[in-house]
Image (tube, rainbow, N blue to C red):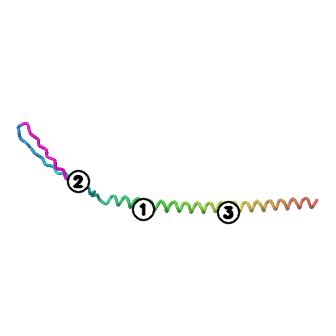
């Protein structure tokens, strides 16, 4: 779209000054590479976030497995203590 603006100004002494302004808008957007740069930074940030959170979830799974194994070991130890107490009680009642 092309628009022409004509401005006429008359001074108090009677002189006339005319200004012509042509405004052209072809609808095409001309920008620098900043849009591509911002998109690239966002993609890199997204990839880094996915990598970070996937690493954290693997860490959480390893921690959960370690806790489960420790609880199992504690349960086995408690079972052995219970068996030893039962054996001691049986020995006391049999020796009397």
Identify the main secondary structure in magenta: strand
Give the CA distance from mark 2 to mark 1: 35 Å
Mark 3: secondary structure: helix
Asked whether, in this view, residue 73 is left or right of residue 34, the answer is right
Left or right: where 89 falls relative to 47 = right
Q: Position of residue 63 (x, y in %)?
A: 61, 61
- Residue pushed farthest right? 96
Identity of the residue drawn at 31% across and 60% down: 33
> Where in the figure is residue 90, as x and y percent of width and height?
88, 60
Q: Is residue 34 left or right of residue 83?
A: left
Q: Earlier in the sequence, mark 1 or mark 3?
A: 1
User: Which circle, 3 or 2, is nearer the viewer?
Assistant: 2
Closest to the observer, 44 or 69: 44
Q: Residue at x 35, y 60 (%)?
A: 37
Residue 5, above or below 62: above
Name the residue that disc number 2 marks.
Answer: 25
Q: Position of residue 84 (x, y in %)?
A: 82, 62
Read off the residue under disc 1: 44
Q: Name the mark nearer the viewer: 2 or 1.
A: 2
Quadrant of the drawing holding the C terminus: bottom right
Q: What residue would you read off at disc 3? A: 69
Disc nearer the start of the sequence (2/1): 2
- Label 2 packing within 10 angstroms: few (<14), some (14-19), many (20+): few
Q: In the rendered picture of this protein, how many numbered marks are placed on residues?
A: 3
Which residue is at a point 37% across and 58% down the rendered structure image? Answer: 38
């Amino acid at each position: 779209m092309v628009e022409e603006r004509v401005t006429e100004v008359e001074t108090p002494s009677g002189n006339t000054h005319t200004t012509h302004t042509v405004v052209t808008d072809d609808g095409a957007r001309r920008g620098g590479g900043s849009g591509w740069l911002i998109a690239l930074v966002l993609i890199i940030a997204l990839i880094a976030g996915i990598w970070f959170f996937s690493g954290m979830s693997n860490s959480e799974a390893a921690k959960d497995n370690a806790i489960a194994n420790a609880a199992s070991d504690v349960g086995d130890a408690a079972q052995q203590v219970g068996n030893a107490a039962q054996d001691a009680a049986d020995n006391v009642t049999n020796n009397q």
